[in-house]
Each structure stands twice: as C-alpha cells, then as structure tokens.
Image: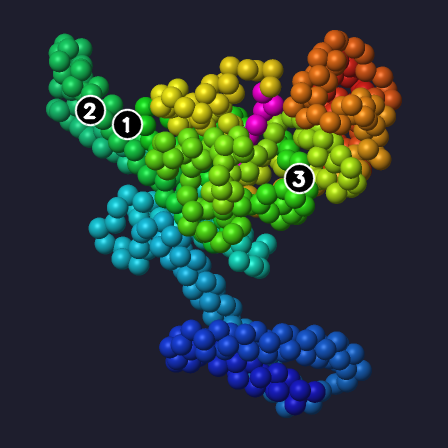
C-alpha cells in the first residue's frame, strides 16, 4: 500500500511544474503546448489511479492495522501530495491567466489597440484596463462553452452586448460617470466648503453670463462623454467585424442623419425561406452571403454603411431588385422577413413541380443576436439618404418601396455571415403541412395561389382582413404546428404568430394557454 502511494507522489513530481521548468517551456510555444497536453494526460491518469487507490484503501483500512512506520510514511507522502496539489492549482491558475492574456491581446490587436504597453493609453485602452476582470469573466464563460474557431467572435459578441447594454457589465458609464463627477466637483462641491464653492453658488444666482458659461462647460463635458462612449462601442464593433467567422454588423457612421440601431427596431422573430438553389450558404449553423462564401473575405466583412453612399445604394438596389444586378458575386446581403405568411407563400411558390420537403423556413430569435445583426430595408434607405440620390433606377426603386405599403412584407437584411446555431430553428414546408397548416389555412393549398408570391400574399391578407372568430380547433392546430415544427421556441409565441395571419376577434384568455 505504501509503495503505491509513493508511486503516485513521484508521478506528480514528474509533471515538472517547478518555476525553472515553467520558464523553459515558455521558450517555445510549440513545446509549451506539447508539455501542457502531456501534463494534462498524466494528470488524468494519476487522477484515475488515485480514485482506484482510494477505493482499495477504504477496504484495506477497515480490516488492517498498519505498523507505525507505515503510518508515518503514508502521512509524509500524503503531505507531499497535498503540497504538489497546491503547486498544481497555482500553475493551472497561471496557465488560465496566460490563456486569457492571449485572448485579450488578440482582441486589442483586432480592435487596433496594443494591450501590451500600458503607458499613455487612449481612452479605449483605459476602458480595457478598467474592465479587465469583467472581460476575463466573459472569456472564461465562453471558454467553458466553446471548443472551436468561433471562440474569438463569441467573446467579442458578448463583450459588445455588455458594452452596448444600459448598465451592462462593460457599460462605459461605469468608468466615465465617476470621472465626470470628479471633474465637475471641486471647487463646486459643497462638501469642500471652500471659498470658491460659496462664490460659485452666489454667482449662479446673480451672474447670468456665469450661469451660461457653467452650463456650456457641463454640455461640453457631456458631449465629450458621448464621443467616448461611441469610441468604446466602435472598438467592439471593429473587433467583432474582424473576428474570424464572426458577423458583420450594420453600424452607421456618426452623423446628424443616422443613429445607432436599437433593439426594438427589430421584431422578436424573423423568417427566411430557402432551398438548395438559394444563393449563399443556408444551413443549421449559418446563413452567409455569396460574397462571404466565395472567399472574398475582405469584401464580405465590409459593413454596407461604411461604404461610400452611392456604392452602398447600388449594392442595396442590386440585392432587393435582382434583375438590376449584373454579377451575383457583388451581393453581400441576405433577406429575411418579419412575416411568416410571406415566408410560407415564398416556399409554396418556389416548390412548384418539386417536393415541399426540399423547401425550408428558418426562424431566428433576434434577441439572441447582437444589435445591428439585422436591419430593416426602410431604415437602410434612410441611413443612406436615398431621397438625395441621383435620379435613376435605384432612387426610383427605393421610392416605390417606401410609398407602396400594400407590397411591404417587413423585409430585413443581414450581411456577411449570420451565425444561427443555438438561436434558430429550421423546418420544411412539408413538415408544416403535415403538422396541420393545411387544415388551419386550406387557402395555402389553392392550386392557383401556388403560381404567385407577393401578389398571393397580398390576396390572402385581403381575404383574411375581415374580423372572424377563433375556434378551439384553430388554437389546437396552431400549438400543434409550433410543437412539432418549431420546438426551439415557446409554443404560445409561435401559435400567436400563426393565428395572426387572420384578423381575429379577441380570444378567451385560456385558449392559448392550453
């Protein structure tokens, strides 16, 4: 028994975790990686051995009284084991810190900042230092859930979300507000009870010019804070847009005519109909544009709103009106709709003469995506100032879209790659029909209706615009479709979307809770 315990101690010692060895491992990244991998394998084997020995020891000690010398030797070895365990824990913490440092360095480089030199940093560098531990917490959380090349963009996406969210973990106000208050404090803070404070208070009541000057100073500080906040968000958008495999967000340049996208601008659910012939990449993991798919990574990662305005308008027109496009390779956009009715009718129209099982509908929960992942077409028209474009096809097309509400079907756009894994659900037209769609809405099976898309969607809306009741069977079918076809989302939410195709009378409170 003593021999086995001693062997375990020796094996742990052979891990070579002394400080001198640690330094030698760092001489070469390759050898360091190999050493860590080897050490992890040894540690795993030792852990199994210890579990085995512990089980054997429990049985042995119940029936055996060890000699005093054996007891002392076992105790000494147990102390060595405890000391080695402490060393091992410390080394693991060091390794984890090195991993976090590596990711933070990559983030800084992607965002255009060096995180190595801490002297004379710009504001973003100071914010990175201020939020260092919170960024590390995000990194650790993502590392616990990610084991592939998506690591960097997932870290950047979470950091962007926390920086952009009011009172988020990385909200710049956490740093800027105390700083601003300190700047405007002395000598204007009553806690100082200085002569300057009382002079300041008196002049606020008696000197109009002084009041204006003081207010102007406050306004300048507030404007400066807004610029600082914007630069912090800019940084994370840049990191995210440069992270391998990450999304390309719609992020308008700061100007009087544009504003940052707000989460309420995008509906909770968006839909996309596609088949094997659809352009771009459409699968369970991502929806990606042609431009990003064919390897023009630099073009596929350029935000439409960062392009020259005329070029952006041309590309937007090419996507929305394919007949005007001369080369598919120039398209970096992908279309979505907030209308499930429109998406279903699109799938029906495209399935003529083919199997309905080949036509898919992807549903995404936009709350699980970063702000700016999706943008409404009408919002983009405004962002590129379409009404001031030169006369031509593009301007005429945008005007038609803006003024003909009958044909508006809630179109939204994404660009580059949209990573949809674990925040979407894909079903087929066949599955929807088999789950009860044909019974709930037999109008979808009208042979004449299958030959049209936008016009048929308009016809159906007119047919269903008259207010009508909702039977228990309608509710049952809607919930059944939700559970069988789109079970990644709350059945009540999906059922409500389905039932909203018709102008229905107010339902009884308990109908949808079945």
Residue 256, position as x, y percentages in the image:
32, 24
Residue 31 picture location, percent across and down:
45, 78
Dot placed on the residue nearer the N-terminal end, 2 or 1: 2
| Front position in the image: 92 or 319 | 319
420 or 510, which lies in front? 420
Distance from label 2 to label 1 (Cα)?
A: 9 Å
Position of 346 relative to 130 (above/below): above
In the rendered image, which quarter is residue 185 located in? top left
In the drawing, what numbered circle is on residue 217? Answer: 2
Distance from Cα at disc 3 to Cα at disc 1: 48 Å
From the top left corner, tell me how far across and down residue 441 is, in percent: 81, 23
In this rendering, does residue 478 appear at all? yes
Quarter of the image with the N terminus in it? bottom right
Mark 3 = which residue?
274
Instruction: Identify the secondary structure beneath mark 2.
Output: helix
The residue indicated by pointer 1 is: 222
């Amino acid at each position: 028994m003593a021999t086995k315990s001693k062997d375990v101690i020796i094996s742990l010692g052979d891990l070579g975790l002394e400080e001198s060895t640690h330094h030698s491992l760092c001489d070469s990244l390759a050898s360091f990686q190999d050493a860590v991998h080897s050490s992890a394998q040894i540690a795993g084997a030792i852990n199994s051995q210890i579990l085995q020995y512990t089980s054997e020891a429990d049985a042995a000690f119940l029936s055996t009284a060890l000699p005093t010398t054996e007891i002392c030797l076992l105790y000494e070895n147990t102390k060595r084991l405890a000391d080695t365990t402490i060393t091992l824990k410390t080394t693991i913490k060091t390794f984890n810190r090195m991993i976090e440092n590596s990711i933070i360095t990559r983030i800084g480089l992607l965002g255009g900042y060096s995180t190595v030199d801490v002297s004379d940093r710009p504001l973003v560098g100071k914010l990175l230092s201020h939020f260092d531990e919170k960024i590390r917490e995000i990194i650790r959380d993502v590392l616990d859930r990610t084991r592939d090349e998506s690591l960097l963009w997932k870290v950047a996406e979470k950091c962007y979300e926390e920086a952009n969210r009011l009172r988020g973990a990385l909200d710049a106000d956490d740093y800027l507000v105390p700083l601003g208050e300190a700047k405007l404090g002395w000598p204007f803070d009553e806690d100082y009870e200085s002569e300057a404070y009382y002079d300041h208070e008196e002049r606020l009541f008696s000197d109009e010019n002084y009041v204006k000057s003081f207010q102007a100073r406050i306004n300048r500080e507030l404007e400066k804070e807004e610029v600082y906040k914007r630069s912090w968000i800019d940084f994370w958008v840049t990191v995210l847009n440069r992270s391998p495999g990450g999304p390309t967000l719609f992020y308008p340049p700061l100007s009087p005519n544009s504003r940052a996208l707000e989460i309420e601008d995008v509906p909770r659910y968006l839909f996309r109909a596609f088949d094997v012939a659809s352009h771009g990449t459409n699968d369970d993991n991502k929806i990606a544009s042609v431009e990003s798919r064919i390897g023009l990574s630099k073009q596929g990662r350029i935000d439409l709103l960062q392009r020259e305005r005329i070029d952006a308008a041309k590309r937007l027109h090419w996507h929305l009106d394919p007949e005007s496009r001369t080369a598919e390779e120039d398209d970096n956009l992908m279309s979505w709709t907030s209308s499930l009715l429109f998406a279903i009718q699109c799938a029906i129209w495209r399935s003529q003469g083919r199997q309905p099982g080949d036509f898919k509908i992807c549903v995404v929960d936009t709350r699980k995506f970063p702000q700016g992942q999706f943008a409404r077409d009408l919002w983009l028209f405004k962002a590129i100032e379409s009404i001031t474009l030169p006369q031509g096809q593009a301007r005429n097309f945008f005007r038609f879209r803006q003024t003909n509400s009958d044909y508006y079907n809630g179109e939204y756009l994404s660009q580059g790659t949209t990573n949809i894994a674990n925040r979407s659900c894909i079903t087929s037209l066949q599955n929807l029909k088999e789950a009860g769609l044909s019974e709930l809405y037999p109008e979808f099976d009208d042979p004449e209706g299958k030959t049209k898309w936008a016009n048929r969607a308009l016809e159906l809306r007119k047919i269903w615009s008259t207010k009508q009741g909702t039977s228990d069977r309608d509710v049952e079918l809607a919930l059944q479709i939700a559970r069988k076809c789109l079970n990644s989302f709350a059945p009540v939410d999906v059922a409500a979307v389905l039932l909203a195709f018709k102008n229905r009378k107010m339902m009884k409170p308990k109908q949808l809770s079945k």
